[in-house]
Structure formats: C-alpha cells, structure tokens
Image: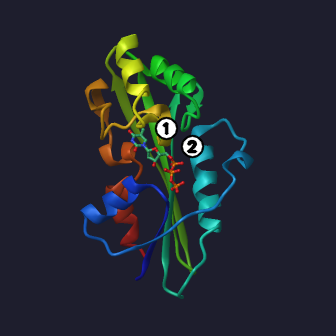
Amino acid sequence: MPLILGSSSPRRQDILKQVKLDFTVRTPNVDESQIKTTKPIEKVSALCKLKAASILFESDDDVIVTADTVVSFNNMIFEKPKTKQEAYTMMRALSDQTHDVHTGVLVRSKHKQKLFVETTKVMFYPLTDEDINEYIDTDEPYDKAGAYGIQGLAAPFIKKIDGDYYNVVGLPIGQLMQVLKQF
Ligand SMILES: Cc1cn([C@H]2C[C@H](O)[C@@H](COP(=O)(O)OP(=O)(O)OP(=O)(O)O)O2)c(=O)[nH]c1=O
C-alpha cells in the first residue's frame, strides 16, 4: 500500500517518520480562502478534502493522507498568523485559558475514503507581555495554527493538555494508524 502524505508540513512528515512508515510527500496546492465557514470542525473537514482533491493518484493502490489543523477559542478560529500583531493577539487571547486544537484528516484510496476530526484541549499558563513579545520575535509562530508550537519554544506555556499531543503538532497518529488498518 503506497502511502502518500499530501502535506508540506515538516511536523507531519516527522510524525510519520517517527513510527517508521514508508511514505512519499506531495504538496497540496489550494486556495484556503475559498472555505468560508466559521465552524472549526466544518473548516478542517473542508480543507483536508480540498487538499486531497489537489493530490493525484499515482498508482491504483495509493493511499493519500491530507490534514488541516486549526485552533479554536471563544467561537474564533486561529489559523497561521500573518503578522506579528496577529501573533500577539492570538497569544494574548490564549493566555491563562483553555482552547481546542482540531485536526481534520482525510484518508483516501481509489475505492474508499475516511474523514475524521480529532480534538485536543490545551490549557495555557498566564503569559506576560515579555513572554509573548520574546516568542513572536522568533520565527516559530508564523507557520503554525494559533501562533504557537507546543513542540518548540512554546512548551513552557503549556499547563495541561487533554487528548492526543500529536494532534496538536498537526497529525493525530494514533487515530490515523487505526484508520489505515481499514485500508
Ligand atoms: C497548535 C500547533 C500547530 N502546529 C502546526 C501544525 C500544522 O503544520 C500547522 C497548521 O497548518 P495547516 O494549514 O494545517 O498545515 P500546513 O500549511 O503546515 O501544511 P499543509 O497544508 O501542506 O498540510 O500548525 C504545530 O506545529 N504545533 C502546534 O502546537
């Protein structure tokens, strides 16, 4: 079963390598702005479907995996911050609060497909302006949903998580492996 990871995210690649799966990488080419919904579960579901539609099957038994991760808090969706100001606003909102990280995953062969959304709750410690300003001066926030990387310099901001850690990093590997067994 040739596995194709349809993602440019280095974290998703690292997680698959960690569990010694053989896979090739293809980069999805999508205009994410065409998905207008403000509901996080609908959004990640639509985005991983859109990403999947941009990856071509290369052989009849290919299995293609695509994913999308967002942070949701107080009815807002936090994607990747485009500016320092946006990163500051996201981190200020997440400080001393609990938010959800949702990752949608689509597993697709020529014969069937399975979509699931995994949710992890993440609680942040209170952050000072100095904590935030130092962090947003690094390059870490800008390619990450919610403007932080739990696996990097933001690790000390985390008080507690409830759910799959790998889901926060962008790929819920436990649930994904369960689904791959059906393919
Ligand atoms: C919350 C959080 C997100 N992230 C990352 C995971 C995802 O790569 C990224 C969310 O962006 P996505 O749009 O889900 O993915 P991507 O643009 O990186 O890659 P592609 O569309 O090609 O698949 O945020 C972390 O690495 N650590 C974290 O703690």
Q: Which residue corresponds to the image point at 40% horizontal and 12% vertical from the top-left?
A: 129
Q: Position of residue 149 (x, y in %)?
A: 37, 37
Residue 170 in sight here: yes
Total labels: the figure holds 2
Q: Position of residue 111 (x, y in %)?
A: 56, 80
Instruction: Kindly tell me whether mark 1's CB lies below 8 Å from ligand 1.
Output: no
Q: Which residue is mark 2?
A: 41
108 is higher (above) or lower (below) than 139: below
**Mark 1 residue element:** helix
Q: Is residue 139 left or right of residue 43?
A: left
Q: Which residue is mark 1?
A: 142
Q: Position of residue 87 (x, y in %)?
A: 51, 27
Q: Quarter of the image for the C terminus: give it.
A: bottom left
Q: CA distance from mark 1 to mark 2?
A: 22 Å
Amino acid type assigned to the residue bearing label 1 in the image = Tyr
Q: Which residue corresponds to the image point at 53% horizontal and 20% vertical from the top-left?
A: 89
